[in-house]
Image (cartoon, grey):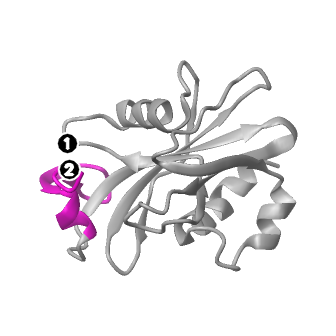
Amino acid sequence: MNDEIFPIVEPDGRVVGKATRRECHGGSMLLHPVVHLHVIGAGHTLYLQKRAMTKDIQPGKWDTAVGGHVDFGESTEEALRREAREELGLTGFEMTALPPYVFCSDRERELINPFIVIIGEETTIVPDPVEISEGRFWPLAEIECAIGTGVFTPNFEQEFSIIRKYLD
């Protein structure tokens, strides 16, 4: 896993190099792209995943339904569809892109490419038990009450303020 190769990008998404996962997550602050998919269900609920305890970043925290890195040579849409299939078993969906933004933590910098998808009750979600310890739909009021309590990843909390306006 640490030998995965990620593109290094400018804030506009232009690829300027490549580096390993280890380099990108090791404090280098190399800007690398990721994808997030926010899954909206009935009653404007939001599906969240609880990150497995084996994850190298933010283990055990609730996070965006789907999140993952764009591999070197892969498009953002290809990465999103791969991650949605791998993490939740979702295929054949139509998504809406939200504006990309740069997220910085104490050990990495990511160019986040967020998307939303609205699913019907007939859609089956099958979380990957290696990546996700659990998942469920959260009412927006429950998310808002838990913001700032340490339940969610800092990245999700920041992004929730962006997607909240799309849910009204």
Q: Is residue 43 magenta?
A: no
The number of numbered discs placed on residues in the rendered structure image is 2
Name the residue: 37% across, 65% down: 56
Whether residue 147 can be seen here: yes
Task: Give neighbour class at mark 2: few <14, some 14-19, many 20+ (Cα, 10 Å).
Answer: many
Drawn side of residue 52 relative to residue 57, left or right: right
Q: CA distance from mark 1 to mark 2?
A: 5 Å
Q: Decide if residue 47 is in sight here.
A: no
Query: Badge 1 is on which residue?
Result: 72
Tag 2 or tag 1, which sits nearer the N-term?
Answer: 2
Task: Identify the residue shown where x is 20% and y is 63%.
Answer: 22
Secondary structure under the numbered disc 2 in the rendered image: strand
Q: Quadrant of residue 140?
A: bottom right
For image coordinates 69% across by 79% down, the residue present is 148
Q: Nearer the viewer, residue 98 or 24?
A: 24
Q: What is the x, y in percent for residue 21?
A: 22, 58
x, y percent for residue 85: 48, 29
> In the image, is 167 to the left or to the right of 108?
right
* As drawn, 101 above or below 58: above
Q: Amino acid at mark 1?
A: Phe
Please tell me which residue is depicted at 57% across the width and 52% down the height of the picture. Answer: 133
Query: What residue span does the magenta drawing correspond to?
Result: 1-25
Q: Position of residue 24 (x, y in %)?
A: 23, 64
Q: Find disc 2 in the rendering and name its residue.
A: 7
Q: Quadrant of residue 158?
A: bottom right
